[in-house]
Image (spheres, rainbow, N blue to C red):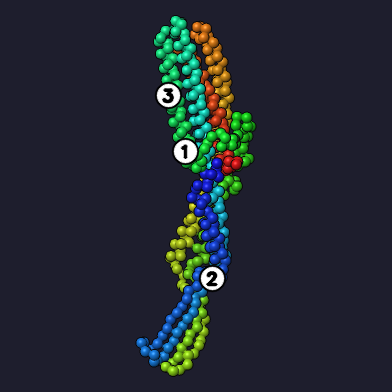
């Protein structure tokens, strides 16, 4: 499911070309020229517009050269950019996984509530049928029949509401994954943990820290930090423009009819330093490196807090499931008891309907609690930086 959602993301579709561009830039930085060469072409004469007089034609190339240490730092920056691109890809996949997880469990909640609402309709219809039979026999008043029919209408209204919520969550998941068929035959079970799974130890956040370097968000922040640091190093070694090696060949003659003379000129062009502009670029690069370092520390702190929150949520969800399990069991036993007593005429209709409603609510709470435990497990693995298992 995650792969289907990821294949629709613009980042996934552009990753190959972005990586190719970064690798091409690294290859360029590994060469002995700092930039593309330039061609030089010029001519000189003392009598423009005529064939007489002296002539001189120069043809050559200008080859930009690296400053000392600049090539190595440019290569280091390219390597850091490739790692940052890969780290960003993993972080984006993890963030998308969080959206898919939330959308999936919301679908499970609404699907379960729809099934429970449909069961409630069936139970209400059965009660209404029993009431109609007893009204016909003279055991109950017509007012009781109206009350039973009201209960059926309320249950049908709840089905319509649950159906709307289910359709909304279904369309949301379809929008993420592009899937159209979410029938049970087309899905594999998604379970990253349930009510039977042993809970993580209380010190799991420290012993299995989500803020270590393997977490995709930490790895992304560290890659960004390394790239900013490499950019600052390159700025420090680039306080002036690249020098240029020029190689020229000159053909010249003094007067018309004289033979051409050939000469070669080799020269070096050294630009002056950029001064305040170079200082500004270097200060900006250093500021970006310091900001990236602070961001890495912030990401580690935030991830630890999120993991602690996910662990607390998991513990709470499991405790709620245990409580609702007992509540649902008692409500079902009460329902069976009052159903029998109502059939025997020992319980009035309002009491029977109230007990039915309490049983429905208890079963709904139990179903929600069970899904909440599974969803809490997903949130725990999300906080620990783990992708859903295929």
When the figure is inspected, residue 153 is found, relative to residue 95, above or below; the finding is above
How packed is label 1: few (under 14 Cα within 10 Å), some, or many (20 or more)? some
User: Residue 12, how many percent across, how many down?
Assistant: 52, 50
Q: Residue visible at 51% across and 74% down?
A: 63
Whole-percent x, y for residue 227 in the image:
53, 56
Point out residue 132 in the picture as x, y percentages from the top left corner. Answer: 45, 11
Q: Quadrant of the N terminus?
A: top right
Residue displayed at 44% across by 87% down: 56
Q: Residue at x 48, y 55 (%)?
A: 288
Distance from disc 2 to disc 1, alpha carbons, whole Å, reads: 52 Å
Query: How many angstroms separate mark 3 from mark 1 (CA)?
Result: 23 Å
Rendered view: 46 above or below 193: below
Element class at badge 3: helix
Chain-order first, disc 3 or disc 2: 2
Reading the image, the residue beneath label 2 is 33
Which residue is nearer to you in this view: 330 or 126?
A: 126
Residue that carries the numbered disc 1 in the rendered image = 172
- Which callout, 2 or 1, points to the residue nearer the camera? 1
């Amino acid at each position: 499911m995650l792969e289907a959602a990821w294949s629709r993301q613009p980042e996934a579709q552009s990753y190959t070309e972005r990586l190719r561009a970064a690798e091409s830039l690294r290859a360029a930085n590994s060469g002995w020229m700092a930039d593309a060469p330039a061609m030089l072409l010029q001519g000189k004469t003392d009598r423009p517009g005529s064939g007489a007089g002296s002539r001189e034609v120069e043809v050559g190339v200008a080859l930009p050269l690296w400053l000392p240490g600049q090539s190595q730092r440019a290569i280091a920056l390219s390597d850091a950019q490739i790692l940052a691109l890969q780290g960003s890809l993993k972080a984006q996949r993890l963030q998308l996984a969080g959206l898919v997880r939330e959308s999936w469990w919301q679908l499970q909640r609404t699907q379960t509530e729809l099934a429970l609402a449909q069961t409630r309709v069936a139970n209400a219809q059965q009660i209404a049928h029993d009431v109609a039979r007893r009204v016909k026999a003279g055991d109950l008043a017509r007012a009781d029949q109206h009350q039973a029919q009201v209960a059926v209408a309320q249950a049908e209204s709840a089905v319509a509401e649950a159906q709307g919520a289910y359709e909304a969550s279904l369309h949301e998941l379809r929008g993420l994954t592009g899937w159209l068929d979410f029938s049970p035959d087309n899905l594999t079970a998604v379970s990253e943990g349930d009510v039977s799974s042993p809970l993580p130890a209380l010190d799991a956040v420290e012993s299995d820290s989500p803020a270590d370097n393997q977490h995709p968000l930490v790895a992304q922040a560290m890659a960004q930090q390394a790239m900013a640091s490499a950019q600052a190093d390159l700025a420090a070694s680039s306080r002036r423009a690249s020098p240029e090696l020029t190689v020229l060949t000159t053909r010249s003659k003094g007067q018309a009819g004289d033979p051409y003379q050939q000469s070669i000129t080799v020269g070096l062009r050294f630009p002056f330093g950029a001064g305040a502009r170079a200082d500004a670029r270097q200060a900006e690069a250093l500021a970006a490196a310091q900001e990236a370092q602070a961001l890495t520390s912030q990401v580690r702190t935030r991830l630890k807090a999120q993991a602690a929150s996910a662990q607390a949520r998991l513990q709470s969800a499991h405790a709620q499931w245990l409580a609702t399990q007992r509540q649902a069991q008692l409500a079902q036993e009460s329902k069976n008891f009052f159903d029998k007593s109502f059939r025997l005429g020992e319980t009035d209709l309002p009491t029977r309907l109230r007990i039915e409603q309490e049983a429905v609510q208890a079963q709904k709470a139990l179903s929600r609690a069970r899904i909440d435990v599974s969803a809490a497990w997903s949130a725990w693995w999300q906080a620990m930086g783990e992708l859903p298992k295929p």
